[in-house]
């Protein structure tokens, strides 16, 4: 296959501006009462089901010119250094990455989860920049599934202090300085959101503690008041939040005039946790306030790896779980015994071990035989019985759990540019006659499970009008599929744990799903379930779980091989062949949820769950539709 060229970041502007501190003398007495409050509706929590709390690498959707990235203790860290000059002279991060315009839309990207900018308007984050000298700071966004091009952005001076800082912006306001502002947040959905920590610098350390994008109309307000002496009404002061009441080493969250004597903190700008506020005006520092406890809302995330039914499990009775050669047609005897057929796999040193298929992609064969580029054309043909071909009206979501060995000396951007991508191919007669080749499925480092909607596009973005390219839905049945796991220029080792080809979830009397549930405060959660017709607004009709209001069965967690967790659901009823979720290191408890659908009229619906911890409620949609039929 010839790889379409993915376009990487575009160079945009930078600036340098100054700022002056205020000086004052006197005293400030702060009254900040002890209380517990929620913090409103956050985009990543509600829409993605995965707050940007930096518990995983993928909480930053993409980055350019950041190396040595790691995640530890809820902090994402890296070193800004230019490895991709095409992306600019400094580094930046995308909390929400729009996706590549030329790639297949897979995963937690803006193409699949655009931001409703009529609701989510308050952007806040805590970020460490080791060098802000003569620095500035910028935020870019894009109303298209394409790189921010500078038509929507703001930039401002940001010179001090070095180290941690909380940033908070009302995205509907003018946040830029002078001409360093363009476009509008609310002129349409936003697909990509990018932060440039310091475009005036390179070679500095960058850390991200958390990012929030909230609906301020849902936010509680925490009111503090103060008295003062020896200061003028017009003295500038800053309000700080500290995570303990010691050391006056907190982060500034707001600027006020001392004469205001009062401030209402919108708690939505902060993540859950305990905070102690104080004021500082020049050298004058107030007492610490009492404890402000901000509740962490519950987290809900549907498991997409065990929804619906699986083709190989249901139709063949032999899942593509990489238990042995029967899972891959192109490792069958016919293929292995004929040297001429090596071109239909292009991999070596392969083995099946503990339910994982590992092999090395051969980057030379295609180049030596037919490709103008040196890139692997390695192929896996998941086993399809031509007597029981895939019904494309039924099966739709290809799940691939895969890891590529990380060479450790290259950024994600460099690896993807080199071919850290997958691709799906299907046909009946011949690829050139009735075949379809998807756009790239972009990989991330480590083990990842990609849920690929084969019907996401009727044509690849890189469609060649000279080719047939029948879309998934129009195929009717499919007798051959290929998953091309890598298109790299050097031989690379990869591992496939499992592949599934899932149907859209369907139900008659019972709908069975898996839901990841968590609350970092450890409160007991009250779960409820609903359906609606448009997948928006959380204004649906209640659904009853089979086992009563507390919902769902117990999930038992146990340590699996190699430290991977597996979940053993304990549920008596099974509507169909039971799939277990493919393990994910999420920190959530996975529950099996069986919902009564008998009274729901036949049709296609969207399901959502809500969880309340007594203070906050989080609701979250299953991102695929559910078909209800009563045959
Ligand atoms: Ca997270
Ligand atoms: Ca402190
Ligand atoms: Ca909570
Ligand atoms: Ca198998």
Image (spheres, rainbow, N blue to C red):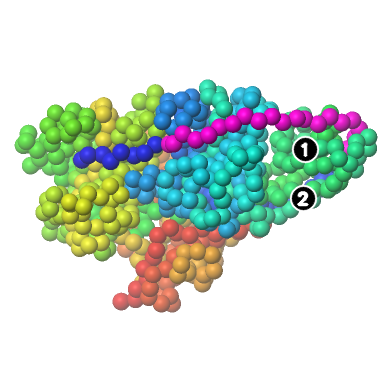
Q: Residue at x 61, y 24 (%)?
A: 131
Secondary structure at badge 2 equals strand
Quadrant location of the C terminus in the rendered image:
bottom left
Specify whether residue 22 is painted magenta. Answer: yes
Question: What secondary structure prevails in the magenta region?
Answer: loop
Which of the two labelled residues, at mark 1 and mark 2, occupies the earlier sequence position?
A: 1
Measured as percent of width and height from the top left, residue 48 is found at: 49, 51
| Above or below, comparing residue 276 to residue 555 in the picture | above
Q: CA distance from mark 1 to mark 2?
A: 13 Å
Q: Residue at x 7, y 34 (%)?
A: 339
Which residue is under mark 1? Answer: 238
User: What label does residue 264 carry, if any?
Assistant: 2
The stretch of residues the image draws in magenta is: 9-28
Left or right side of 459 for 589? right
Measured as percent of width and height from the top left, residue 94 is found at: 50, 40
Residue 295 in sight in this render: no
Q: Quadrant of residue 277?
A: top right
Viewer-proximal residue among 425 and 358: 425
Residue 26 in sight in this render: yes
Disc 1 beta carbon < 8 A from ligand 2? no
């Amino acid at each position: 296959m010839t790889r379409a060229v993915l376009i990487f970041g575009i160079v945009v502007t930078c600036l340098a501006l100054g700022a002056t501190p205020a000086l004052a003398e006197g005293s400030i007495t702060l009254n900040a009462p002890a209380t517990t409050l929620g913090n409103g509706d956050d985009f990543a929590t509600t829409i993605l089901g995965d707050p940007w709390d930096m518990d995983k690498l993928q909480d930053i959707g993409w980055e350019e010119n950041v190396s040595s990235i790691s995640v530890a203790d809820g902090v994402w860290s890296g070193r800004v250094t230019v490895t991709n000059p095409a992306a600019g002279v400094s580094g930046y991060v995308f909390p929400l990455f729009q996706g590549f315009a030329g790639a297949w839309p897979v995963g937690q990207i803006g193409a699949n989860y655009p931001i409703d900018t009529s609701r989510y308007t308050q952007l806040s984050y805590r970020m460490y920049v080791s060098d802000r000298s003569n620095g500035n700071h910028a935020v870019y966004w894009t109303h298209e599934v394409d790189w921010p091009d500078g038509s929507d952005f703001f930039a401002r001076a940001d010179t001090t202090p070095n180290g941690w800082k909380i940033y908070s912006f009302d995205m509907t306001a003018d946040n830029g300085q002078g001409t360093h502002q363009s476009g509008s947040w609310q002129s349409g959905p936003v697909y990509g959101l990018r932060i440039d920590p310091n475009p005036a610098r390179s070679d500095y350390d960058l850390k991200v503690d958390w990012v929030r994008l909230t609906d301020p109309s849902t936010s509680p307000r925490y009111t503090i008041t103060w008295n003062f002496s020896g200061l003028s009404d017009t003295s500038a002061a800053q309000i700080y939040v500290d995570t303990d009441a010691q050391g006056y080493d907190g982060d500034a969250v707001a600027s006020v005039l001392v004469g205001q004597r009062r401030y209402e903190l919108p708690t939505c700008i902060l993540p859950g946790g305990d905070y102690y506020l104080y004021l500082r005006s020049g050298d004058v520092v107030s007492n610490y306030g009492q404890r402000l406890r901000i509740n962490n809302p519950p987290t809900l995330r549907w498991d997409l790896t065990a929804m619906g039914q699986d083709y190989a499990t249901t139709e063949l009775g032999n899942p593509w779980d990489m238990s042995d050669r029967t899972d891959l047609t192109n490792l069958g005897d016919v293929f292995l015994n004929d040297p001429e057929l090596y071109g239909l796999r292009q991999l070596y040193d392969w083995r099946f071990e503990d339910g994982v298929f590992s092999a090395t992609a051969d980057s030379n064969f295609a180049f030596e035989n037919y490709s103008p580029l040196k890139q692997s054309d390695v192929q896996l043909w998941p086993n399809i019985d031509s007597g029981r071909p895939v019904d494309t009206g039924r099966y739709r979501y290809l799940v691939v759990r895969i890891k590529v060995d990380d060479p450790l000396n290259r950024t994600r951007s460099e690896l993807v540019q080199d071919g850290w991508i997958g691709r799906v191919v299907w046909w009946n007669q011949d690829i050139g006659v009735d075949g379809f080749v998807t756009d790239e499925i972009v990989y991330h480092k480590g083990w990842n499970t990609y849920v690929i909607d084969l019907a996401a596009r009727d044509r690849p973005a890189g469609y060649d009008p000279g080719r047939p390219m029948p879309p998934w839905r129009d195929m009717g049945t499919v007798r051959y599929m290929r998953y091309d796991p890598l298109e790299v220029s050097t031989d690379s080792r990869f591992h496939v744990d499992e592949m599934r080809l899932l149907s859209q979830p369907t139900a008659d009397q019972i709908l069975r799903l898996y839901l990841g549930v968590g609350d970092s405060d450890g409160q007991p959660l009250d779960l409820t379930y609903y359906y609606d017709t448009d997948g928006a607004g959380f204004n649906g009709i209640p659904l009853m779980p089979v086992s009563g209001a507390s919902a769902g069965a117990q999930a038992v967690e146990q340590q699996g091989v190699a430290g991977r967790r597996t979940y053993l659901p304990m549920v008596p009823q099974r509507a169909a062949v039971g799939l277990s979720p493919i393990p994910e290191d999420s920190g959530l408890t996975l529950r099996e949820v069986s919902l009564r659908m008998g009274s729901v009229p036949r049709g296609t619906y969207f399901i959502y769950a809500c969880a309340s911890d007594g203070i906050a409620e989080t609701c979250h949609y299953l991102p695929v539709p559910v078909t209800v039929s009563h045959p």
